[in-house]
Image (spheres, grey):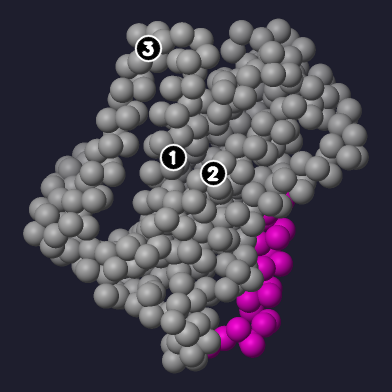
């Protein structure tokens, strides 16, 4: 449960014990190698590739031209974007208070944005915090899975919407029509598959086993050991989740869309504040670039996608522009990433200190049940 510098989407296997949600500890040399590779990619992008897109001198001049009011407004938007994800967490884990959502989200974000393999470590931070506040492993796991699924639904849906809007704006081309059809197909398949999992235990087991075969085939390609029990996990997820979603799917959907949409608004506002006009880059073009880069950022190439995300935005948004406008766009991307990726890191460090020192929030399961009242009951397995 974190932000991707923006928002990171936590996904874990459904189940009821800590081993299913706790991140695996890899060998130290693997983490070192991963860190070296990530650093090489980041340096290669910022030193070798980005200067070919825009001159850093012009980029810096554009950034320093921002007024205090413009910078302050962007920071306020960035803070609002952070806060929107807290409501997603509250919706996914009944009984969680907003201030607790803020602390756990920011702390796990800081870890995910700074360490190689930080996403897995961030899950461990999330579990440690939530269990110390009286939440069960089963409720935490379900919350992580549900938020991951809803985030992926929105991520898959946004490119479809963007492509449809692009087609209306600039005419339907075969390439756009094909991309839209593929996107709609993937999204519909994902939603139908999820619905079938919830419909019956037999279908849940069948779909779980089918997905397991595909995943294990892919694991075999990378010489990794196959995992068993996919059908049992799918059936267990259904049993624990169907009643919860009956009451919570609407608020999860709304809060997830608002959270992703607010991040797009931060990017669009940054572009406008550095001087990129609607005529140079329409809001629909920005939405399309944002939607597809969000899909790319799901790949754990570097911590928080640093370097990869910036390059993705630059490649998508500078196509066909003159040198001056390219510099403005790259300046906007760097400002956007600073306020959505870098700023949450110190906030996360502060949040971690709050968790360690604030003992008044430490509860056992019975105390959490009493504090949350009826809301806690909907967080328990059906």
The boundaries of the magenta stretch are 342-363
Find disc 1 in the rendering and name its residue.
155
The disc placed on residue 260 is 2
Corner quadrant of residue 275? top right
Please state if 105 lies on the left or on the right of 249 as rendered.
right
Corner quadrant of residue 50? top right
| 1 and 2 marks in contact (CB < 8 Å) | yes
Judge whether residue 350 is colored magenta: yes
Q: Nearer the viewer, residue 210 or 283?
A: 283
Which is more N-terminal, label 2 or label 1? 1
Find disc 3 in the rendering and name its residue.
175
Residue drawn at the location 40% of the way across and 62% of the way down: 248
276 to 379, vertically: above or below: above
Location of residue 280 in the rendering, given as x and y in whole percent from the top left corner: 68, 14
The quadrant of the picture occupied by the C terminus is bottom left
Location of residue 368 in the rendering, given as x and y in whole percent from the top left corner: 49, 86
Please state if 279 lies on the left or on the right of 370 as rendered.
right
Please state if 249 lies on the left or on the right of 358 as rendered.
left
Residue drawn at the location 32% of the way across and 71% of the way down: 19
């Amino acid at each position: 449960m974190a932000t991707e510098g923006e928002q990171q989407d936590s996904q874990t296997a459904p189940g009821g014990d800590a081993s299913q949600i706790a991140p695996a500890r890899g060998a130290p040399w693997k983490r070192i190698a991963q860190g070296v590779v990530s650093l090489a990619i980041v340096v290669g992008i910022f030193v070798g590739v980005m200067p070919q897109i825009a001159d850093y001198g012009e980029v810096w001049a554009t950034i320093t031209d921002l007024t205090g009011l413009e910078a302050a407004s962007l920071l306020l938007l960035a803070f609002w974007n952070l806060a929107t994800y807290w409501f997603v967490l509250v919706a996914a884990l009944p009984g969680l208070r907003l201030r607790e959502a803020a602390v756990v989200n920011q702390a796990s974000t800081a870890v995910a944005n700074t360490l190689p393999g930080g996403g897995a470590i961030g899950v461990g931070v999330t579990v440690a915090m939530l269990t110390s506040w009286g939440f069960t492993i089963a409720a935490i796991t379900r919350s992580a899975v549900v938020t991951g699924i809803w985030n992926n639904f929105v991520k898959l849906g946004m490119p479809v919407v963007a492509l449809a809007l692009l087609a209306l704006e600039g005419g339907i081309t075969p390439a756009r029509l094909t991309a839209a059809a593929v996107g709609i197909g993937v999204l519909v398949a994902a939603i139908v598959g999820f619905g079938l999992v919830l419909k019956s235990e037999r279908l849940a087991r069948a779909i779980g086993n089918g997905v397991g075969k595909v995943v294990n085939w892919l694991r075999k390609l990378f010489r990794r050991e196959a995992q068993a029990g996919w059908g049992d996990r799918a059936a267990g997820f259904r049993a624990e989740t169907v009643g919860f979603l009956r009451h919570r799917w609407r608020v999860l959907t709304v809060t997830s869309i608002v959270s992703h949409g607010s991040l797009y608004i931060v990017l669009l506002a940054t572009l406008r504040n550095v001087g990129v006009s609607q005529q140079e880059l329409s809001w629909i073009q920005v939405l399309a670039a944002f939607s597809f880069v969000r899909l790319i950022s799901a790949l754990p190439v570097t911590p928080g996608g640093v370097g990869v995300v910036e390059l993705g935005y630059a490649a998508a948004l500078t196509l066909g522009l003159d040198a001056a406008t390219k510099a403005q766009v790259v300046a906007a991307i760097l400002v956007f990433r600073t306020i959505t990726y870098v700023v949450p890191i110190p906030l996360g460090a502060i949040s971690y200190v709050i968790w360690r020192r604030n003992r008044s929030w430490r509860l056992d399961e019975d105390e959490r049940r009493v504090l949350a009242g009826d809301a806690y009951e909907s967080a328990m397995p059906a």
